[in-house]
Image (cartoon, grey):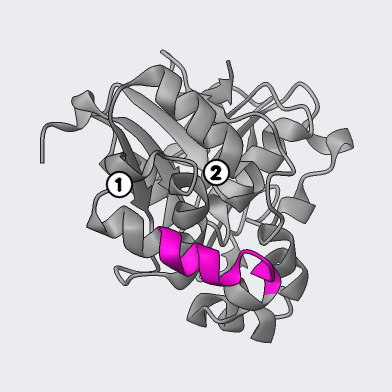
Amino acid sequence: MPPLENYAVVVVDTLRATTTMATILERGAQGVLPVADVDEAFSLRDKNPHVLLGGERHNRPLPGFDAGNSPFDYPESMVQDRLVVLSTTNGTQAVERVRDASWVALGALVNARACFEQQIRAADTGLVVCAGTEGQVALEDVLAAGSIVSYWPTDLRGDGAHLACAFYRRWQDDLVQGIRLASHAKTLINQGLEQDVDFAASLNIYSRVPVRQSTNWFAYS
């Protein structure tokens, strides 16, 4: 595969980081910064007390943080005009792994069409990176990736894109049931987070995409 800087990269962590970060911006935040390390998150808040900290490990909110990794943790009254740093088990790690790409955006079912539209403007070649769950393929991320690449011209899809698109087509008329097939969805439901799972199945409810800025913060361009 050519170097990452040749691609317009969309990182997908449907349950729940990229869904949550898109929601944070929709609710009026100035920017959101995914970080892999909890200590880095605390350091950023020490430098700027106006920063909010959010995130989880193993689906549980982190001690000392302002919120967890649920889109419902971030009402407009909390995040309006604020900066939010997020650190999660899988999604923010995936963003870190594509740091060398020249253009990076955060995608999910909630903004699939907008991801395609922004991605195709950014570069001739697109790449969707699925965060997965603790190193394993995550069905919900394949579903969301399929929703994005379903807008790509057929002749530009590789085998992985064709597979993801086929899975998405199977469930596009019942995304809630499709996403509930995922093992991670079942774990979240068992932990009382069923609302998060069903919300993540909402297709194209957002028309904008979090894009990495020169500061490394993600914002609406």
Q: Residues within 10 Å of mark 1 (few under 14, many from 20)?
A: some
Residue 34 lies in the magenta-colored region? no
Residue 27, image x and y in percent? 79, 34
Looking at the image, which is closer to me, 187 or 119?
119
Residue 206, image x and y in percent? 71, 38
**Residue 208, picture quadrant:** top right
Residue 168 lies in the magenta-colored region? yes
The quadrant of the rendering that contains the N terminus is top left
The residue tagged 2 is 86
Instruction: Determine whether the residue tagged by mark 1 lies in a helix, strand or loop.
Output: loop
Q: Is residue 33 left or right of residue 200?
A: left
Q: Residues within 10 Å of mark 2 (few under 14, many from 20)?
A: many
**Residue 200, picture quadrant:** bottom right
Please tell me the numbered disc located at residue 122. none
Cα distance, mark 1 to mark 2?
31 Å
Q: What residue lies at 66% left-to-right and 56% top-to-bottom? A: 68
Q: Is the magenta stretch mostly helix, strand or loop?
A: helix
Tell me if residue 37 can be seen: no
Residue that extends furthest to the right in the rendered view of this protein: 77
Kind of residue at disc 2: Leu
Tell me if residue 8 can be seen: yes
Q: Give the range drawn in magenta.
A: 165-176
Q: What residue lies at 46% left-to-right and 61% top-to-bottom? A: 141
Q: Is residue 207 left or right of residue 144?
A: right
Looking at the image, which is closer to me, 4 or 188?
4
Residue 28, image x and y in percent? 77, 27
Q: Is residue 182 left or right of residue 100?
A: right
Kind of residue at disc 1: Arg
Comparing labels 1 and 2, the label whose residue is closer to the camera: 1
The quadrant of the rendering that contains the C terminus is top right
Instruction: Determine whether the residue tagged by mark 2 lies in a helix, strand or loop.
Output: strand
The residue tagged 1 is 157
